[in-house]
Structure formats: structure tokens, C-alpha cells
Image (spheres, rainbow, N blue to C red):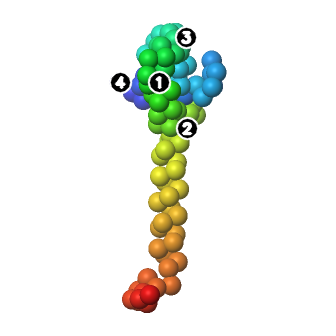
Amino acid sequence: MNEQNIKHLRRTQNGRIIAGVCSGVGDYVGIDANLIRIGLAIATLFGGVGIGVYAIAWLLIPEEGKDTSIVQDLISKQQAKSTWQSSTDPWKDEQKPQQ
């Protein structure tokens, strides 16, 4: 099996209503996105779980054309920021003064 045949779960641009989660999941599993939307609506009516599932999927599923999700981008930015701060810390090699 080569890389061209591997399916990737992505939020799609085509068929998007809000963030493309339902259309992306529908494409990935091979069913109509409207069935997923109905399922999430029913889950929302019974306890609000549908909204949480949609929000988590929106944060964790990468957008079409990208390799990383929103959460992965935020983690990478935070790691880069902390790496930059530690490399520019003037007290890095010396003991920090006590306050």
C-alpha cells in the first residue's frame, strides 16, 4: 500500500457549513455528512455532548491541505516560545537572584 492510497482524516473545504468537521468525517468513513450532522444534533439535544464532540474534533482534526491541527500548532508555538525565552535568558548560566 503506497501513500497515495492512504486516507487521511481532514476537515474539508467542500461541503463545509461551520468548520468542515462533519464533511471531513463523512468523506473519511464514506457516509453522507448530513447523517453525521443529524447524529451530532441529537447528541446535543440529549445532554449537549454533540457540541463538545464537535469542538474537540475541530481542534484535533487538521484542515484540508495542512498536516497539523489547531492544537498541534498551538503546542508548537508554545514550545518555540519557551525555547526562545530560555535561549535569551540572561540568567541562564548564573544563579538567579533571590527575591
Measured in 3D between alpha carbons, the distance from the residue under mark 2 to the one under mark 4, in whole angstroms, is: 22 Å
Q: Nearer the viewer, mark 4 or mark 3?
A: 3
Q: Nearer the viewer, mark 4 or mark 1?
A: 1
Q: Residue at x 64, y 21 (%)?
A: 17
Residue tagged by mark 1? 48
Image position of 94 with respect to 62: above or below: below
Measured in 3D between alpha carbons, the distance from the residue under mark 4 to the one under mark 3, in whole angstroms, is: 31 Å
**Could you say whether the residue bearing mark 1 is in a helix, strand or loop?**
loop
Residue tagged by mark 3? 34
**Could you say whether the residue bearing mark 4 is in a helix, strand or loop?**
loop
Q: Nearer the viewer, mark 2 or mark 3?
A: 3
**Could you say whether the residue bearing mark 3 is in a helix, strand or loop?**
helix
Measured in 3D between alpha carbons, the distance from the residue under mark 1 to the one under mark 2, in whole angstroms, is: 29 Å
Amino acid marked by disc 4? Met
Amino acid marked by disc 2? Lys
Quadrant of image for the N terminus: top left
Residue tagged by mark 4? 1
Measured in 3D between alpha carbons, the distance from the residue under mark 1 to the one under mark 3, in whole angstroms, is: 18 Å
Badge 3: how crowded within 10 Å, few (<14), some, or many (20+)? few
Amino acid marked by disc 3? Asn
Q: Earlier in the sequence, mark 1 or mark 2?
A: 1
Residue tagged by mark 2? 66
Residue 20 picture quarter: top right
Q: Position of residue 13 (x, y in %)?
A: 63, 25
Q: Residue at x 52, y 50 (%)?
A: 74
Q: Residue at x 51, y 32 (%)?
A: 55
